[in-house]
Amino acid sequence: MRVSSTTSAGQRPNQSLATRAQRGSVILIVLITLMFATVAMFVFIERASNDLLVEKRSMDATRLRLEAYSALETTLAVLEDFRQANGVLRSPSEGWGDPLAFAGYQPADGRKVEVTFEDESGKYSLPNVNQATLVNLFKAWEMTESDAAKLADAVLGWMKKDYVAISAGAPDAEDYEHEEIPYDPPGRPLKSFNELATIAVARDFFYDETGQPNALWHRFVSAFSLYSFKSPSINGASSELLAGLGITDTLQQKQLDDYLHGRGIYENKGAGFFKTADEVAAMFGAKSPVAALGTQIS
């Protein structure tokens, strides 16, 4: 007689263990699948969030650009109105200093638009500057007479063809031929102030030992405009402009600054501006170099 052992359900022990193993494998596979699905979902959400953020920023930039163009068109329209009424533009003190307020322009909710002006004709026109003006300005920057003349010749020799230097030590064509990579002076006005780094002698004055623009470089940029115009405007004049004319009298500089900005004795009158050369001569004298300046924005 043979006796066999069975479970309560009538299954053999080895069959029960196999079934449990199969069930455990299925659960493990499901858990692994859920883990990968969760990771994939997180990656998808992160990428989708980045894509949505990029798209939102792109749309915001488009809307802000339209707002900026609208403000620019309004500004130009106001300036043109004043130009037609007065014939020329001289100074923001004429009434167009805040063109958006003048036109009643209101940006969309949550946005702020500001307009600022920089009068390039209140600087010297670098394409038309002469040697005497450069020397006067550099001397006002506490350079020696010889250094000022040498630097002026270096800048003019770079910009003007067949320029004849008048100072000792000024660079010539041969100096550029001996550079590590030889090149020739272009014989045309600067297109960028970064060109100063390629001008022999000038780079020694305008850049530090690490090759970065120094204080003189920034001062030069603030004093000169790359645009070509005949005469600077006294209504946008700075102390640098006066120094280039050889005017080093600080009292005269302060008088002009106070008049243009409505300070000191002119505080009650507010910011002023000159309409004609006769008005300039009346304040500074007909023989003053200031009388040769223009009065309108070029």
Image (tube, rainbow, N blue to C red):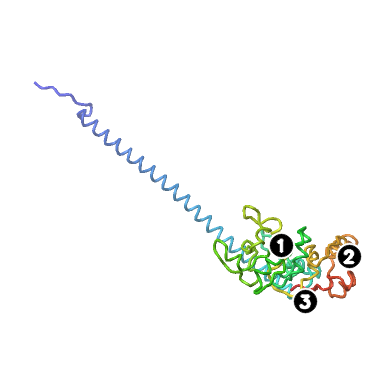
User: Label 2, on which residue?
Assistant: 269
Q: Residue 191's quadrant in the figure?
A: bottom right
In the image, what residue occupies the spot 34% across and 41% down?
30
Question: Residues under labels 1 and 3: Cα distance?
Answer: 28 Å
Q: Sort mark 2 into few (<14), some (14-19) or many (20+) by Cα contacts within 10 Å.
A: few
| Residue on which disc 3 sits | 88
Tag 2 near tag 1, CB within 8 Å: no
Task: Please name which of the two marks, 1 or 3, marks the residue nearer to the observer.
Answer: 1
Mark 1 and mark 3 residues within 8 Å of each other at the beta carbon: no
Q: In this view of the protein, which residue sits in the foreground, 19 or 147?
A: 147
Report the disc number at residue 220. 1
Mark 2 falls on what kind of element? loop
- Quadrant occupied by the N terminus: top left
Name the kind of residue labelled 2 in the image: Lys
The x and y percentages for residue 259 are 86, 65
Q: How far is mark 2 from mark 3, CA to CA?
A: 22 Å
> Which is nearer the eye, 91 or 129?
129
CA neighbours of label 1 inside 10 A, class few (<14), some (14 to 19), many (20+): some
**Spot occupied by residue 196 in the image (x, y as percentages of width and height):** 64, 63
Query: What is the secondary structure assignment of the residue under circle 3?
Result: loop
